[in-house]
Amino acid sequence: MAHKMITVISREDIARRVAELGEEITAHYHGQPLVVVCVLKGAFLFYADLVRHIRTPMEMDFVRLSSYGSGTSRGRQAVFTKDMEVDVDGKHVLLVEDIVDTGRSAEFLLHVLEKRGAASLKICSFVDKSERREVSLKVDFAGFPIQKGFIVGYGMDYAEQYRELDAVYELVPE
């Protein structure tokens, strides 16, 4: 199926907002050590750009989730396909997501990190699709609110394609 791509967020807007988020995060943590966790695969470009703008001591780690279940979004269970290596006990943790929509994956990760003894937990998401939220969850540092549309680029994909794009596009069937 052919798709048309409509620009939703330009490369320049991304660069500006990522720098602003880095400043907000730096101000929030006031130089306190931080563990910054990238949720793979989608957040990897955002994460790489973001951590270069955060001015506080940090450890970096990565996690990847997969879900299984009935094939629908409701009732699916999340499992780690790549777990973290850094111990978060007593540390401030910032979870970096590409997009938070239903909130179920982020909720699962927050619950796990809380059980592992994190001193504090915050979420930074490149895209916040709050109208699709199925759980009560707050994105503490939100890049761009987007209400609708299937988006790709800047790490986000469709069938493992388009992650490499330096802007965000809505993918529209032709």
Image: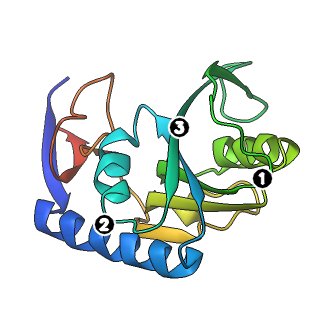
* Sequence-earlier tag: 3 or 1: 3
- Determine which of the numbered discs, if any, sits on residue 93 in the image: none
At a point 58% along the width and 58% down the height, the residue shown is 34
The reply to whether the C-beta atoms of the residues labelled 2 and 1 are less than 8 Å apart is no
- Residue 104: x %, y % from top left: 69, 44
Q: Quadrant of the C terminus?
A: top left
Rendered position, 22 above or below 160? below
* Sequence-earlier tag: 2 or 1: 2
Dot 2 falls on a residue whose secondary structure is: helix
At a point 28% along the width and 71% down the height, the residue shown is 19
At a point 20% along the width and 23% down the height, the residue shown is 1
- The residue under label 3 is 61
- Residue 110: x %, y % from top left: 74, 49
Q: Residues within 10 Å of mark 2 (few under 14, many from 20)?
A: many
Q: Which of 42/146 is in front? A: 42
Q: Is residue 43 left or right of residue 117?
A: left
Identified by mark 3, the residue type is Asp
- Determine which of the numbered discs, if any, sits on residue 18 in the image: 2
Q: Is residue 91 visible?
A: yes
Q: Residues within 10 Å of mark 1 (few under 14, many from 20)?
A: some
- The residue under label 1 is 118
Kindly report the distance in space between the C-alpha atoms of the residues bearing marks 2 and 3: 19 Å
At a point 66% along the width and 22% down the height, the residue shown is 80
Identified by mark 2, the residue type is Val
Choose top left, top right, bottom left or bottom right for residue 116: top right
Q: Between label 2 and label 1, give the one nearer the viewer.
A: 1
The reply to whether the C-beta atoms of the residues labelled 2 and 3 are less than 8 Å apart is no
Q: Residues within 10 Å of mark 3 (few under 14, many from 20)?
A: some
Identified by mark 1, the residue type is Ala
Dot 3 falls on a residue whose secondary structure is: strand
- Residue 97: x %, y % from top left: 49, 49
